[in-house]
Amino acid sequence: MVIISDYLVIGTGVAGLSFALKAARTGTVNVICKRGLADTNTNLAQGGIAAVLGDDDQVEYHIRDTLDSGVGLSKYATVKAVVEAGPRVVRELAELGVPFTARVDHPEWPELGQEGGHSHRRIVHAQDMTGAVIQKALIEKARSEPNLHIYERSQALDLVIDDETGSRTVLGAYVLDIDQARVVTFGAKVVILATGGSGKVYLYTTNPDGATGDGLAMGVRAGARAANMEFIQFHPTCLYHPKVKNFLISEAVRGEGAHLVDKNGGPFMKKYHNLGDLAYRDVVARAIDAEMKKSGDECVFLDISHKPVDFVRGRFPSIHARLLSLGLDMTREPIPVAPAAHFQCGGLLVDLDGRTDIRGLYAVGEVAATGLHGANRLASNSLLEGLVMADRSFLAARAEVEFGLTPDPIRIDGAPTWSVARLGHVPRETMVIAKSWDEIRRFMWNYVGIIRTDYRLKMAAARLALVKTEIDDFFQKNEVDANLIEVRNIAQVADLIIRCAGLRRESRGLNYNLDWPERDDQNFKHDTVLSG
């Protein structure tokens, strides 16, 4: 069975749906969604979108803050293009019906929040649930588009590649229909990977369960290059609670005056950076890690109880309500927090229009290494990047389609079909999948986490080699299901992270290695690029 469209979008976060909605105006679009449409990192994003809209702010300031956060590895052209487009994409969302929080004195203007690393207030937000309201608006619009067809509970398995012409070209993707337990082939003139990040490669993460690096793994297996995968951002303030595994306490809480304190109420961030609680995320995560190791405690605390109760409830209604349901009142007591894997700053290497090395294949959002984030992402630049790069990629892809520069998707009929002959050869051993998943996530957390050493990386590589062999063998001999696809992908992503971290013999941004504690611009002020 082959399903054909002009555009095939894999992923339904802000980048994927933004691209799909624009593409649906000019052609047919199929959207692949492995769970529900709202099961995305976008939906969980609390903070907002960084955009230069304040009277005292300037594009140059936002560019400077982003470059400073990226520790020398952000690409100026990318930063400039993304930052300059910020106000426009915010207006587009407002026109779509996204209800951004307005200023009290000027209701026609959005209220601008403050977050760590930003020199000015520039975070456009919808209280503390910005991602959820954006996701809702995009979903409602997508469901009304006649040219746009959504396939939920469909898991992309691998890309269909034609390299007979000497130029690797994407023809589509093999997709597992989870409910029907069958593999369907999708063909398209252009394929867009918008699958988000890979937080589930770590034991503790703020990401949803679907964040398993699917697009990144598929792209690399197809021959695309990956870059800067050593830079995994650990969010400093994930709620530490036995009943909750991935609830994020927004950066905006610190932006509005919260202090990080130890169990005795003592603030500690000024010891680590002159920006104190508003330091960059890599600095704050390492500071918390150091405090926890020094004290032996399993968390630190985030305290905003000194602020007026009405202000806290009004600014953070979602966080406040969730904490109350767990018996915590942020208006009266500190919140227990600890770092957790949050954002993938590297990804598939793309140009300024989202093109990968493979003809017809684009990557947008967290799956892509655009050069915006460098060695550390500035808060609230992720939704911004997804929106701007989706727009740029759409314009480039549309031009390719309209000028006939893309392959005819009918050619996919000549591509190999997904082999079903091997399915069911060996009785299912689901324990193997669960064991491999757990093992990878534990040694990645212990050996390739916030603090690394050469020895830990060597140990992680050795462990992963054994696990990958088991997974690959199991994949070849057993029936494919969503869990097997995901564990295969996180193994691929773990390999990229370990290899990139091993190549960077310095400490920069999110890659901190005790054996190479200094930043080395002479030898390592460049991307870490891998093939396959």
Image: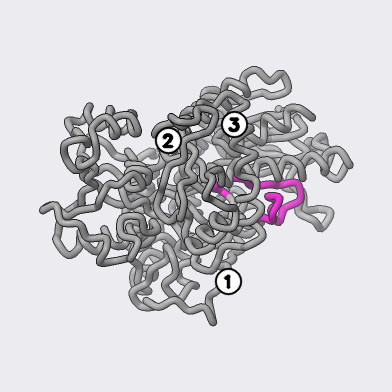
196 sits to left or right of 313:
right
In this view of the protein, which residue sits in the foreground, 11 or 160? 11
For the point 21% across and 35% down, the residue is 331
How packed mark 1 is, by other alpha carbons closer than 10 Å (few <14, some 14-19, many 20 or more), is some
Q: Which mark is residue 44?
A: 2
Amino acid identity at mark 3:
Leu
Dominant SS type (magenta): loop
Q: Position of residue 388 (x, y in %)?
A: 63, 44
Confirm whether residue 73 shows in the render.
yes
Confirm whether residue 469 shows in the render.
no
Q: Which residues are magenta?
A: 350-367
Residue ID for mark 1: 526
Structural distance between the alpha carbons of marks 2 and 3: 17 Å
**Colour pattern of the rendering:** one colour
Amino acid identity at mark 1:
His
Q: Position of residue 462 (x, y in %)?
A: 39, 66
In this view of the protein, which residue sits in the foreground, 407 or 247? 247
- Whichever of callouts 3 and 1 sits on the residue coming sooner in the sequence is 3
Dot 2: element = helix
For the point 84% across and 54% down, the residue is 165
Dot 1: element = loop
Q: Which mark is residue 93?
A: 3
- Whichever of callouts 1 and 2 sits on the residue coming sooner in the sequence is 2
Q: Position of residue 307 (x, y in %)?
A: 24, 40
Structural distance between the alpha carbons of marks 1 and 2: 32 Å
